Image: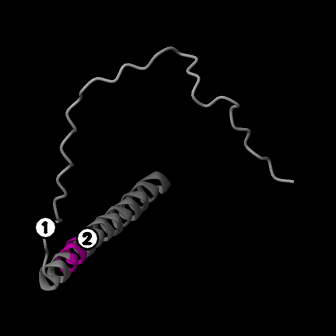
Amino acid sequence: MLLKPQLPQNPTANVAGPVIHGHHPAAPAPVRRSLPSVSTGAAVATVLLGGVVLTALLTAVAVSAISVAIAAVVLRSLLNSQHHR
């Protein structure tokens, strides 16, 4: 069974004491500003440019990793050949 809220018997009784109502000026309503409009072409160009930049960075990291791996293999080969002599 659902719980039923119990209402107070005397809703006009104020336990905390009298409430003093003063005159407060109403706060102005917040101004809603619209988002700046961006054309679809500019958005597509930005996404494409970001993709190109990220792809270039990923390619640079891959080329660097491959060159470091090749250098490590060459150094290992040189050290092993010196050790066996």
List the residue tagged with mark 2: 54
Mark number displayed over residue 36: 1
Amino acid at the residue labelled 1: Pro
* Number of residues whose C-alpha sits closer than 10 Å to that of mark 2, classed few (under 14), some (14–19) or many (20 or more): few
Q: Where is residue 25 in the image (x, y as percent from the top left)?
A: 19, 33
Residue placed most toward the observer, 6 or 1: 6
Q: Which residue lies furthest to the right in this view?
A: 1
Q: Residue furthest bottom?
A: 41
Q: Is mark 2 on a helix, strand or loop?
A: helix
Overall secondary structure of the magenta stretch?
A: helix
- Residue, x 17% and y 84% (percent of image)? 40
Q: Earlier in the sequence, mark 2 or mark 1?
A: 1
- Residue, x 65% and y 28% (percent of image)? 10
What segment is highlighted magenta in the picture?
47-53
Left or right: 37 in relation to 64: left
Left or right: 48 in relation to 85: left
Where the C terminus falls, by quadrant?
A: bottom left
Amino acid at the residue labelled 2: Leu
Total count of labels: 2
Quadrant in the rendering for residue 20: top left
